[in-house]
Image (cartoon, rainbow, N blue to C red):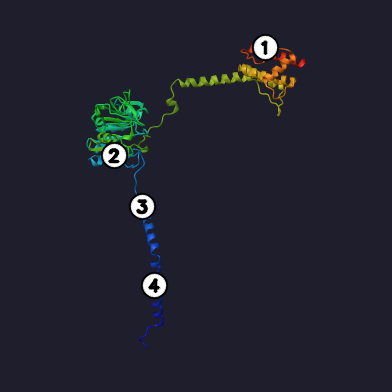
């Protein structure tokens, strides 16, 4: 009996075996469900990693923007051709990249006009070549290259041909003119018919190139027409390209903004008191003309005669002869219809015919009187008296 195992150990071993058998059976029965759950979990992990992973930005003309309005494609193409594209996030980084580069080219897209004149001149002086995309008026004035704005590309010119002797536009061919801007001065290319201004202008001895459209560099239109060729030939001559899009942090907020007194001309200080004096005189003049206010208890009962007189004065002030004539004619016909008992549905001709038959007068004569259109106020008064006489004759019969 000494070699026999305790009953509790035998019983425990039996329970463990049974639990293992049950787990194995459950896995075998639900292995399809387990496989589907594993696939869903893996897909969920991939989606979350894609959403939470680092992405590009959505800034137009940015080299990290892979959208239609970005410029990631042209930056990658330039990189494959040996051009080092330096993305400058601010003014300091742009100046550092220009000073460290070898004959660098600067691409500047300051669509909001954040840079002031001194900074623009410093950037242009540090760069070997400057390519400005759709510049503002103050940007062109600061660069001082003799190039100025000249409007927009007409809708009748959706595609523009080079039309100049510069080698880069000649090699690139036609480009899109939609939503583009025109510039005059220097050597202009891609000119609409009948215009001396072009979509591309080159000045300052070839050191400054102005391109009036972002479509030439954007991902969405880089593969159409000659956009890719023009972009690469314009940005690719230098081994270093500094791509600079000024942001809000580049805005110079050091100086205090000019006040209204600083912006106003000197003669405004004399004009202000004079306008106050004129306003007081006008209030006194109009106030005396209207007279003092009259307080009456409500409701106010206005007599019909007063209403008619007030309306007549309004017609007289506005010289509304035709409106007054129509009202007098309508009132006369309504009263004649009541006296002649022609009924509410009778027309003007029926009322006139009934009056002519009652008075024994030609209907044509009464019709000319009723339908007359006085041209002056004096004739209107005389005509109204003739209508009143006609009504009196009808009443007396």
Q: Are marks 1 and 4 in contact (CB under 8 Å)?
A: no
Q: Which residue is mark 2?
A: 74
In front: label 4 or label 3:
4
Q: Which residue is mark 4?
A: 21
Badge 2 density bin: few <14, some 14–19, many ≥20, Cα 10 Å: many
Q: Which residue is mark 1?
A: 382
Which of disc 4 and disc 1 is earlier in sequence? 4
In front: label 3 or label 1:
1
Examine the rendered structure and indicate whether residue 395 appears above or below residue 182. above
Examine the rendered structure and indicate whether residue 93 appears above or below residue 153. below
The quarter holding residue 253 reads top left
Q: Would residue 198 be found to the left or right of residue 30 on screen?
A: left
Which of disc 3 and disc 2 is earlier in sequence? 3
Examine the rendered structure and indicate whether residue 89 appears above or below residue 150. below
Spatial separation of the CA atoms under disc 1 and disc 2: 87 Å
Q: Are marks 4 and 3 in contact (CB under 8 Å)?
A: no
Residue 355 rendering spot, x and y as whole percentages: 72, 16
The quarter holding residue 295 reads top right
Q: Would residue 33 be found to the left or right of residue 288 on screen?
A: left
Q: Which residue is mark 3?
A: 49
Examine the rendered structure and indicate whether residue 212 appears above or below residue 323. below
Which of disc 1 and disc 3 is earlier in sequence? 3
- Residue that appears at 36% across and 53% down: 46
Q: Which mark is residue 338?
A: none
Badge 1 density bin: few <14, some 14–19, many ≥20, Cα 10 Å: few
Q: Secondary structure at mark 1?
A: helix
Spatial separation of the CA atoms under disc 1 and disc 4: 122 Å
């Amino acid at each position: 009996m000494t070699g026999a195992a305790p009953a509790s150990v035998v019983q425990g071993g039996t329970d463990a075996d049974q639990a293992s058998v049950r787990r194995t059976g459950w896995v075998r029965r639900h292995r399809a469900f387990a496989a589907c759950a594993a696939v869903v979990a893996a897909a969920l992990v991939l989606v979350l990693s894609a959403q939470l992973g680092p992405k590009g930005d959505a800034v137009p003309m940015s080299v990290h923007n892979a959208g239609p309005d970005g410029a990631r494609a042209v930056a990658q193409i330039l990189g494959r051709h040996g051009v080092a594209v330096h993305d400058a996030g601010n003014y300091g980084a742009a100046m550092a990249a220009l000073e460290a580069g070898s004959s660098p080219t600067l691409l500047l897209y300051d669509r909001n006009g954040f840079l002031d004149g001194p900074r623009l001149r410093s950037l242009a002086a540090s760069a070997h070549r400057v390519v400005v995309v759709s510049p503002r008026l103050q940007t062109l004035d600061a660069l001082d290259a003799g190039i100025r704005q000249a409007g927009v590309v007409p809708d009748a010119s959706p595609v523009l041909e080079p039309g100049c002797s510069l080698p880069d536009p000649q090699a690139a061919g036609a480009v899109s003119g939609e939503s583009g801007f025109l510039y005059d001065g220097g050597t202009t290319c891609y000119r609409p018919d009948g215009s001396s201004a072009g979509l591309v202008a080159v000045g300052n001895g070839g050191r400054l190139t102005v391109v009036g459209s972002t479509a030439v560099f954007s991902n969405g239109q880089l593969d159409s027409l000659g956009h890719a060729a023009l972009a690469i030939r314009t940005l690719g001559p230098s081994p270093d390209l500094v791509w600079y899009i000024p942001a809000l942090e580049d805005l110079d907020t050091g100086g205090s903004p000019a006040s209204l007194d600083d912006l106003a001309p000197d003669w405004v200080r004399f004009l202000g008191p004079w306008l106050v004096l004129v306003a007081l005189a006008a209030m006194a003049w109009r106030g005396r003309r209207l007279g003092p206010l009259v307080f009456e208890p409500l409701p106010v009962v206005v007599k019909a005669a007063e209403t008619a007189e007030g309306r007549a004065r309004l017609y007289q002030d506005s010289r509304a002869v035709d409106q007054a004539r129509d009202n007098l004619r309508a009132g006369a016909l309504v009263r004649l219809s009541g006296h002649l008992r022609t009924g509410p549905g009778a027309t003007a001709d029926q009322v006139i015919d009934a009056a002519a038959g009652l008075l024994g007068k030609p209907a044509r004569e009464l019709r000319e009187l009723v339908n007359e259109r006085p041209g002056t106020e004096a004739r209107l008064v005389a005509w109204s008296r003739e209508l009143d006489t006609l009504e009196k004759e009808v009443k007396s019969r």
